[in-house]
Amino acid sequence: MPIRVAIAARLADVRTRIGNAASRAGRAEGSVRLVLASKTQPVEAIAAAYQAGARDFGENYVQEAASKRAALAAMDDIRWHLIGHLQTNKARAAIEMFDLIQTLDSARLAAALHRLRPAPPIAVLIEVNLAGEASKNGVAPAAAEALVEAVRGKVEVQGLMTVPPIAEDPAATRPYFARLRELRDRLAGATGLALSELSMGMTNDYEVAIEEGATIVRVGRAVFGERR
């Protein structure tokens, strides 16, 4: 099957599943944004997804994203998301490249972004490491409020993002998604910010994440197939 046809079919299936999960939660399908995690995927695969209607793509590395963005410059309505860790020395390139940085985890990074673009402030999500995993980035839940307060004048904090521990059973990640939603609600009340975005859920568990309140899901394998 041609890659364009296969990707279009898988994208349609994911959209159907998103709609069904939203319906189960009493939400509109349009309340969930699908970001296609395109790390290591060739430009041809991204173009095929674009032709099938996708507009949001998430990349983990600034350099890889730069080459893809250049190759796909004609598709100028793509919205690029940074979903991998951002080093401070890559802040300038990230500002020029991404519409949303989903992985802000320090006041130092926010200050660097602000120095490079004080206005309008770049949109970010605060990455929260709910399980305290040493292998993952993100602020501890107990430190999230202090970080939001420290960066709110420097960047536009739109919400929270998390990557829970890997589990084969999607039900095992549900408590983490519920915790992120509860943390968001508490932080919104404490800070007065809307924090309307919750980025959580990937190929294995995005339906559960939607049932728990995700507004953004990051799906790669379910649309692109196994990474090469």
Image (tube, grey):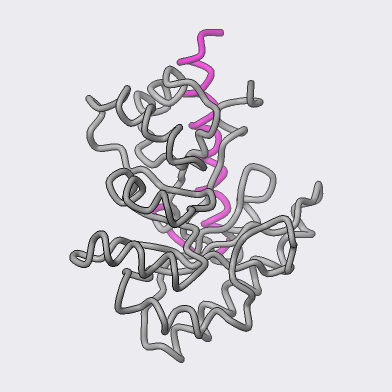
Residue for point 44% across, 69% down: 108
Q: Residue 161: horizontal and vertical position, in percent?
A: 53, 62
Q: Which SS does the magenta portion mostly show? A: helix
Classify 132 as above or below 182. Answer: above
Relative side of 208 to 200, left or right: right
- Front residue of this view, candidates 165 and 87: 87
User: What residue is shown at x 41% (from left), y 74% (from top)?
Assistant: 195
Left or right of 10: which side holds 152? left
The stretch of residues the image draws in magenta is 1-30
Q: Nearer the viewer, residue 107 or 208?
A: 107
- Find the residue positioned furthest to the front: 89
* Quadrant of the image containing the C terminus: top right
Q: Quadrant of the N terminus?
A: top right
Viewer-closest of 89 and 129: 89
Residue 8 lies in the magenta-colored region: yes
Q: Residue 21: x, y in percent?
A: 58, 53
Residue 222, percent across and down? 61, 33
Task: Count the marks.
Answer: 0
User: Residue at the spot x=69%, y=67% of the render?
Assistant: 176
- Quadrant in the rendering for residue 118: bottom left
Q: Is residue 80 magenta?
A: no
Determine the residue located farthest toward the top in the rendered image: 1
Give the vertical position of 168 relative to 197 (above or below). above
